[in-house]
Image (tube, rainbow, N blue to C red):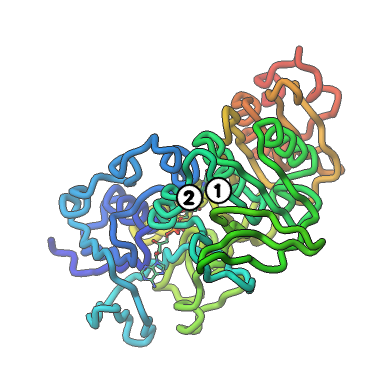
Amino acid sequence: SQDSRHVVIAGAGHAGGSAAAMLRQLGWQGAITLVGEEPIPPYQRPPLSKAWLKGEATTESLLLRPAHFYPDAGIDLRPGTRVTAIDRAAKAVTLSDGAALSYDFLILALGARARRLPLPGRDLGRVLELRTVADADQLKAVLHPDARLAVIGGGYIGLEAAASARALGAEVVVIERESRVLARVAGPILSNFFQDYHRGQGVAIETDAQVIELDAADGTVAGVRLGDGRVIPCDATLIGVGVVANEALARDAGLGCDNGIIVDLAARTDDPAIFAVGDCTNRPLPLYGRMARLESVPNALEQARQAASQICGKPPPAPEVPWFWSDQYDLRLQIAGLPFDATETVVRGDIPGAKFALFHLAADGTVRAVEAVNASTEFMGGRRIIARGKRLSRRRIEDMSVSMQELAA
Ligand code: FAD
């Protein structure tokens, strides 16, 4: 091709892999190099705590695109390779294999890593985390019927892993520091619902529990010691206490970072030649008038599209309502929006019947977020309502004789 320009993408996860593909879709004629430290082509992480853990997915089905896609699309994929430094003045990056690559545009898609607890016993055998396919394989290897799994952290990953472990016949205890599971990401009604549901499935949940240390037997974890003196015996421990953005590469290059690499709505950092996308960013949320670091596939895709559009000189895509999903047992949770500034929660549907949606409203009645359990119509309608900044009354939301179509109209 005549186009001698070069896009380098650092990080070959969901955001980086998608950005490479979108650049080609939008007509980028120049070179693309996709550098990722993991040994396999870009793959999806959501199944790692769900279908993959339960042995219901193949490696091929994890991949974002088949391996031959990259050479076919003229994308130079370099697996097993890290970007180690950025020289902004020279517009070049250094790689772990010693190579240097110059770029016209650089996209940082570095993702996040599991937060490490400074916990005595953290380095014992069978103390696991769940971020990569390699992590998931280790967890899968210890999950046999009657294995005892202690999950530290009642967030989405911990709860999804708990549900999958139960499906495999393991005994599970979830240990949560806060007074309810999902405390950081969901309202109390949803937390209580999931807590009850997990208990109904035989998961023990310890809330307000402080983990002091991990006990060992022959170098392997044998128990989780709590602040009240109790020890939860276990054969393996999964620590799922949130993630930390991989921002060091950007910070070392002098780019603005604050709980993530700071970007604008075109996914641009404060260097016009450098973009950042996905879990590693702290991004504006125009619908909510603030910045946030989101950890979701839809966010990774939205920002990949923002960066690719900008680089290809295409109009910026319209901002999306953030959304997220989680699957546990036969429950499909879908969340539209974020409950910022919400002062009121309205229930639509049947909580004991596990088919309902929670509408979170601001003081003026504007819908900020909808948490839907086995209620995808409410989720879809909720996204439209939030996008338009619509106000709804409690009475109309609760009234199941008013259809979602009418509510969203
Ligand atoms: P990542 O997918 O983490 O990719 C970043 C990549 O960059 C990694 O491969 C990393 O090794 C690599 N990298 C880092 N530094 C360098 C470097 N210096 N050089 C080269 N490569 C580097 N989201 C949902 O929306 N729904 C779900 O149900 C859901 N379930 C999940 C379940 C699990 C178990 C996990 C772990 C995540 C889940 N997520 C879910 C979150 C979702 O997977 C992430 O939001 C998404 O992967 C973010 O994509 P990313 O490309 O920003 O980061």
- Circle nearer the N terminus (2, 1): 2
- Report whether residue 309 is seen: no
Residue 394 appears left or right of 254: right
- Identify the residue at the far front of this view: 218
Mark identifier at residue 116: none
Count of labels in the image: 2
Q: Residue 351: where, in percent of width, then height?
A: 75, 25
The residue type indicated by label 2 comes to: Glu
Q: Position of residue 38 (x, y in %)?
A: 33, 63
Quadrant showing the N terminus: bottom left
Q: CA distance from mark 2 to mark 1?
A: 8 Å
Q: Nearer the viewer, residue 270 or 296?
A: 296
* Tag of residue 319: 1
Q: Residue furthest bottom?
A: 89
**SS for tag 2?**
helix
Q: Nearer the viewer, mark 2 or mark 1?
A: 2
Name the kind of residue labelled 1 in the image.
Pro
Residue 177, given in percent of the width and then of the height, sits at: 75, 58
Residue at x 24% of width, y 61% of height: 77
Q: Which residue is mark 2?
A: 302
Determine if the C-beta at disc 2 is less than 8 A from ligand 1: no
| Closest to the observer, 268 or 257 | 257
In the figure, 132 relative to 382: above or below? Answer: below
Picture residue at 62% right of the left edge, 31% below the top: 379
